[in-house]
Image (cartoon, grey):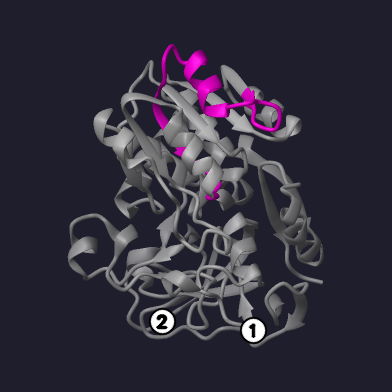
Amino acid sequence: MRAAVMDAHGEPLEIEDVDYPEPGPDQVVVETEACGVCRSDWHAWQGDWGWVGAQAPPGQILGHEPAGIVADVGEDVETLEEGDRVTVPFHLADGSCPHCRAGRANVCETVIPLGFTSVTPGAFAEAFPVREADFNCVKLPDDVEFTEMAGLGCRFMTAYHALADRAGLRPGDWVAIHGCGGVGLSAVHIADALGAHPIAVDVRDDKLERARELGAVETVDAASAENPANEVKALADGGADVSIDALGIAETCQNSIGSLGKRGSHVQVGLTTGEEGGEVSLPVDAMTMQEIDFHGSFGMPLVRYEELFRLIAQGTLEPSKIVGETLSLEELPETLASMDDYETIGIPVVTEFGD
């Protein structure tokens, strides 16, 4: 089968013929119908995240935002069969650890991210295997399209968990979103849909325009603003109730915290680059005196998919609005490389995998 392979960090992905996966006893093989191209794929391609033990090795097949059709089923799998339409969260869990049993599979003790290790080849390929398939595969409602669901395995569901669960977003809250890539634009749309007032912050006019289309009531051009955090505070009547760093660089993390009013909540969604190496300096005294909460947010618990699908069925949430462009596997290397300069808008989705 055909796959986009990362032969070396920073070098263009190569479209290669690789062996079709065989399912282990607890696995299924999913034929890929759509897969989002995420900034996390860019991080892996750059060789980031060795500091948290998650550096993707050379030879890796990336891709962790898939939707597709079950094509082969391992002998121990009980709840899935060939032809099932599924999506898969990027944080593949074991289903048995204390966190999984408590409904928090996104922080499983033995989580293995799809597409970031040699034992979990990703979905930039015609097909990919899924560990503990009974637990990790999520059946799709019949009325949703694969392309619409492609961002659901990472960016859209991550933004939903960050706002609804970690920050406890309430209608009427002011929400600052720092960074308007795929997860940031998802957060803008979700915040608006849940009755909050999103303020989008970015350095590119085209991304701020897209944020306005998705419901941002105010925008801040961080490229021209003398102090983006203070501009957010002025727009939010003294400070945002919730603020998200959707990018993961020191500047956006610090601006996010600086945007908050007293007793506000910062949510860290973006993981850092090689420049930060996982460490960012924070104003801890000010955070203490103002009772600022700092939340990490990683993916979304599997038990939350039901609510997400319900809101999509009602038309409250529309993941398709975040999709930017669709492309073929051959176009993937150039699209991934364009993330060097933050050129993609929304969620690019690979929809053509064959010759």
Q: Which residue does the numbered mark 2 point to in the structure image?
A: 74
Residue type at tag 1: Gly
From the viewer's perspective, tell me whether residue 42 is left or right of residue 313: right
From the viewer's perspective, tell me whether residue 179 is left or right of residue 171: right
Q: Earlier in the sequence, mark 2 or mark 1?
A: 1
Q: Which residue does the numbered mark 1 point to in the structure image?
A: 59
Looking at the image, which is closer to me, 94 or 312?
Answer: 94
Q: Please provide the residue range marked out in magenta.
A: 220-249
**Residue drawn at (47%, 35%) of the image:** 256
**Residue drawn at (34%, 58%) of the image:** 106
The reply to whether residue 109 is visible in this rendering is yes
> Which quadrant of the structure image shows residue 113?
bottom left
Distance of mark 2 from mark 1, alpha carbons? 25 Å
Q: Position of residue 247 (x, y in %)?
A: 56, 47
Q: Secondary structure at mark 1?
A: loop
Q: Is residue 51 magenta?
A: no
Residue type at tag 2: Gly
**Residue drawn at (58%, 18%) of the image:** 218
Looking at the image, which is closer to me, 1 or 57?
Answer: 57
User: Circle 1: is it few (<14), some (14-19), or many (20+) Cα within 10 Å?
Assistant: some
Q: Position of residue 54 (x, y in %)?
A: 47, 72
